Image (cartoon, rainbow, N blue to C red):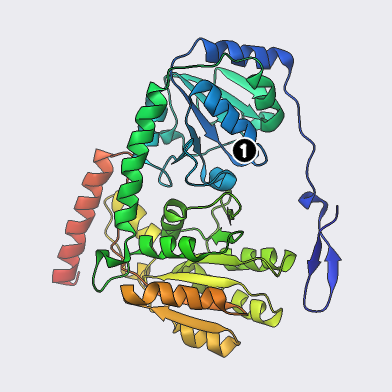
Amino acid sequence: MDVLISTADASVSSLATLKPQPEIVASEEDIAEMARRIDDAGSIVIMCGAGCHGAADELRALSDRLKAPLIHSVKGKDIMPYDDPRWMGGIGMIGTKPDYHAVMHCDVFLMLGTDYPYSEFLPRECVVIQVDERARVIGRRAPTELGVVGSVRPTVKSLLDRVKPRSDSGFFDRLTAERKAWDEKLDRQSDPTRSRDRIHPQAVARAVSDLAARDAVFVIDTGLNTLWSGNWIRQNGEQRIIGSFNNGAVGTALGQANGIQALDRSRQVIALCGDGGFNMLMCEFLTAVQHKLPVKAVVYNNSSLGLIRLEAESMGLPAWKAMDFPNPDYVALASACGGVGCKADKPGELREAIDRALKAEGPAIVDCVVPADELPNVPHIDLEKIGNVAIAKVKEEIIAVTGA
């Protein structure tokens, strides 16, 4: 069925790429070999990527049958509700410490519909089984003992008929307990009352998540804000999470949000942007106003290129002046363009500002002033990088004192 993209004055047919693609059925021989290796293994971790969309029921059934936790890439985060007991969170910087340890200590790592690129967070010594429609991506991220070409949903459905059910839930239960403790840590970090006069970026993401519509679309920009949004949005299973996850392009979120909003003007679309990325393509807000697209832009305003700063310091390099910049008055900008502007620079103002913007009839900007020195959680402690950050901080203090 064609999707119509409605603009202010015209309707045009969508590209054929928006149509559902046919599924690829894995071979019987591959299904049988997968079942044999899984049945012979102890602990199992199942990683779900974008290719798992539409297979939530099959994934739940496989998790229950194997007593295996489901973890996800950022592109697969929205497949299931955050609070599904099988859905244990992500890996990497947009992930959890418990998941990292589970991946590194499991016997079988089953990669479903994912080409997760950060191989340092993938196992090296267990049996890796990868299922994907794209033969070209199999085996290029982790040493893979069995590669299966096939779509996730029919492959898992066939696998369910072959693998033996398990009764030992010890591995799953331990990860569940560790996940609960991790979630409690995230709750503390996102509590608006954590500081009296500072809005922490975790609180921004959590407030947006709590106040968003039941079927909202979150569009996440690239940068340090990706970590805040990716780790603190608690999706409900009906919401979508989208971003430039393949290309890692900075500044694209608002443009993507406009395109998504054009497909359905009645659905709430929220762009979560760092100030650096927002400033690169802030003209997209004028586009939203011109075409009457009620997009909401939430800006993490720390007057800094936060991810560039973090990456530099992790290599022992001090932050330089070009990483910090003055920002425009986003409230005035929104008003000048014909939209709604809201600002929060104190914790008590945060939820009210976000709520007001989300309820606005047209496009809106929320200016959330957050500190630039907030560090993200680290799922895996890299002692070399920690040492480099310490060296970089010392260098920054010397520069501040000497003016060098």
Which residue lies under the disc numbered 1? 56
Q: Nearer the viewer, residue 218 or 256?
A: 218
Name the image quarter holding residue 205.
bottom left
Which amino acid type corresponds to the residue marked 1 in the rendered image? Ala
The residue sitting at 54% across, 73% down in the picture is 358
In the displayed structure, would residue 144 be above or below residue 96?
A: above
Taking 317 as reference, is 72 left or right? right
Q: What x and y, as percent, mark residue 389?
A: 24, 51
In the displayed structure, would residue 231 be above or below residue 250?
A: above
Q: Nearer the viewer, residue 55 or 144?
A: 55
In the displayed structure, would residue 93 be above or below residue 23?
A: below
Q: What x and y, as percent, mark residue 82?
A: 49, 47
- Secondary structure, mark 1, is helix
The residue sitting at 21% across, 45% down in the picture is 387
Q: Nearer the viewer, residue 49 or 171?
A: 171
Q: What x and y, as percent, mark residue 1?
A: 86, 52
In the displayed structure, would residue 93 be above or below residue 85?
A: below
Asked if one can make out residue 151 in the rendered structure from this viewpoint, the answer is no
Q: Nearer the viewer, residue 116 or 195?
A: 195
Name the image quarter holding residue 269.
bottom right
Q: What x and y, as percent, mark residue 4?
A: 82, 63
Asked if one can make out residue 258 in the rendered structure from this viewpoint, the answer is yes
**Number of numbered discs present?**
1
The residue sitting at 38% across, 22% down in the picture is 170
The residue sitting at 66% across, 77% down in the picture is 287
Taking 8 as reference, is 285 left or right? left
The crowd level at tag 1 (other Cα within 10 Å; few <14, some 14-19, many 20+) is: some
Taking 164 as reference, is 121 left or right? left
Residue at the far front: name it: 167
**Quadrant showing the C terminus:** bottom left
